[in-house]
Image (cartoon, rainbow, N blue to C red):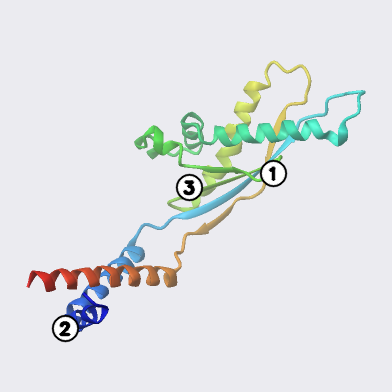
Amino acid sequence: MELKEYFLIIKKQFKLFLSVIIAVVASIFIYFIFRPVFFDTSLFLNITRAGNQISEGYKYDNFYRLQADEKFAETITQWLKSPRVVFDINKEAEITNIENLNLKQLTKVFQADKLSAQIVSVKFSAPDKKTAEKLALAIPVVLKKNINQLNEDQKENTWFEIKTDDPVIMKNNPDMGIIFLVSLTLGLFLGFWVVLFRHYWQ
């Protein structure tokens, strides 16, 4: 079948073609208008030391310390993917519905990325601003507890510490322009196949 014939089929069934496009675009817009509101949160964790180890040797501009910081930053990112740590953070924030999640879902609550040797970025979503603030405050508290447990046998005050700034909390507002283009593309695709199916069915 030539391309011209496809255009003739669409022209013949243009009302159906247009109806499918409008239905798809309207459905997607309605979904995004009435969907639950979420607040995206970004938090930076700065890894520092409680003290400096006394050493007479050459320190190579603290190269080994930076290496240790980087390795510990990786540990922090893995902690934030651990169901046990995620559960403890939600418990610290007094959030009870976390018990409804399974282990796989718990590992996806927080998105942690190591940006540099001493900075870990944490991102997550919450249903309201107050919950986002409580979670942002609970994260360093739980992480510090875990660090203190590792630090119990340390004789020198050289273990790691975590410092945080105020979190950035923004309402998740979707880009309606992109949503329109995506829904229009999907509508054109579905409209074409619906018209074609009806043509061959007749």
* 88, 82: nearer the viewer: 82
**Disc with the residue nearer the chain's start (3 vs 1):** 1
Residue at left offset 73%, top offset 26%: 159
State the mark number for residue 116.
1
Q: Give the amino acid type for the residue marked by disc 1 in the picture.
A: Ser
Give the number of the disc on residue 12: 2
Q: Position of residue 115 (x, y in %)?
A: 65, 46
Residue 140, above or below 145: below
Mark 1, Cα crowd under 10 Å, few <14 / some 14-19 / many 20+, is: some
Q: Residues within 10 Å of mark 2 (few under 14, many from 20)?
A: few
Q: In which quarter of the image is residue 23?
A: bottom left
- Answer with mark 3 or mark 2, whichever residue precedes in sequence: 2
Residue type at tag 3: Thr
Query: Tag 1, which secondary structure?
Result: loop
Q: Which of 115 and 99 is in front in this view?
A: 115
Given residues 189 and 39, the one toward you in this image is: 189
Nearest to viewer (mark 3 / mark 1): 1
- Circle 3 residue: 131
| Callout 3 touching callout 2 (CB < 8 Å) | no
